[in-house]
Image (cartoon, rainbow, N blue to C red):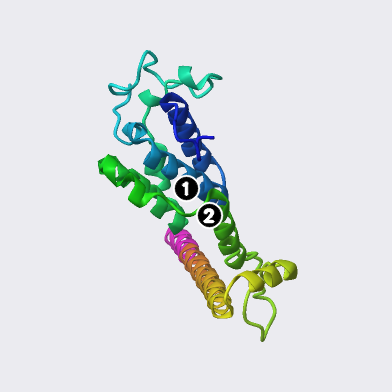
């Protein structure tokens, strides 16, 4: 209703925008991107709701009778959403996923947008498409299982999670072959870097342990020499 409707209830839209920001902060990258795409679209279509991007705590002139946001309110008109600020975007702009951080930063910059620019910037990407795109990216760049095989001589590389064959085949029908090849190359570069970092960290730990043991040995040796010298002097 809020996505396609021509007339929007400002209080209801603001309450939903606030919920979307909280949702994006609380769930995974795919879900968060779908929420942010919806949030951006609603802000583009509801210029007054952009006050949430620059409100001081307590709200501005649009906050109405409710001057404090209540996330648990069952009635959006009593939630006081227009009195709040989208502080979640500040955290999301530092998200580890560059797609999420970029979208959050883009939304934050809308505070200075001219209302007449709205139609020119309306997003053509649906929340479902945004969710699917980030799900594909997550599958292709799925993190490795950190169980290293350092005890296996003559073998390089760590054990990693194998991507499901059915998912790979479905991706091949949706994406260009060159794109898939590039994604897999990036995937294995990440794996190799992780492996090298783990090896270096292991060597560093071994060296540090050896140095500590040597220092303890020297201290114990000095103590023994001092005790021996005291005994000789006392004799």
Secondary structure predominantly adopted by residues drawn in magenta: helix
Crowding at mark 1 (Cα within 10 Å: few <14, some 14-19, many 20+): many
Q: In which quarter of the image is the N terminus?
A: top right
Please tell me in which quadrant of the rendered image residue 63 appears: top left
Q: Nearer the viewer, residue 220 or 232?
A: 220
Which residue sits at x=47%, y=68%? 211
Extreme-bottom residue of the structure: 154
- Is 165 situated above or below 133? below
Residue 162 appears in the picture as rendered? no
Tell me the element at label 2: helix
Question: Marks 2 and 1, Cα distance to the nearest angstrom?
Answer: 7 Å
Q: Where is residue 119 in the image (x, y as percent from the top left)?
A: 35, 47
Q: Which residue is drawn at 70% across and 72% down?
A: 169
Residue position for label 1: 37
Q: What stretch is highlighted in magenta?
A: 218-235
Residue 140 vs 49, above or below: the answer is: below
Q: Name the residue under label 2.
A: 130
Left or right: residue 18 versus residue 28 is left
Residue 222 belongs to the span the image colors magenta: yes
């Amino acid at each position: 209703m809020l996505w396609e409707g021509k007339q929007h209830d400002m209080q209801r839209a603001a309450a939903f925008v606030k919920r979307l920001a909280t949702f994006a902060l609380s769930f995974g990258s795919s879900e968060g991107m779908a929420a942010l795409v919806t949030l951006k679209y609603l802000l583009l279509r509801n210029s007054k709701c952009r006050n949430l991007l620059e409100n001081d705590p307590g709200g501005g002139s649009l906050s109405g009778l409710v001057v404090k946001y209540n996330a648990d309110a069952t009635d959006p008109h009593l939630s006081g959403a227009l009195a709040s600020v989208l502080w979640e975007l500040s955290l999301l702009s530092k998200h580890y996923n560059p797609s999420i951080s970029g979208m959050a930063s883009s939304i934050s910059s809308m505070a200075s947008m001219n209302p007449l620019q709205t139609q020119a910037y309306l997003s053509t990407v649906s929340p479902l498409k945004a969710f699917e795109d980030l799900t594909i990216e997550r599958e292709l760049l799925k993190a490795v299982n950190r169980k290293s095989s350092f005890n296996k001589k003559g073998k390089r590389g760590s054990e990693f999670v194998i991507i499901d064959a059915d998912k790979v085949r479905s991706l091949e029908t949706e994406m260009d072959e060159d794109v898939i090849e590039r994604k897999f190359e990036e995937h294995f570069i990440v794996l190799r870097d992780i492996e090298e970092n783990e090896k270096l960290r292991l060597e560093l730990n071994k060296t540090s342990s050896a140095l500590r043991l040597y220092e303890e040995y020297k201290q114990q040796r000095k103590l023994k020499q001092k005790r021996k010298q005291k005994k000789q002097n006392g004799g």
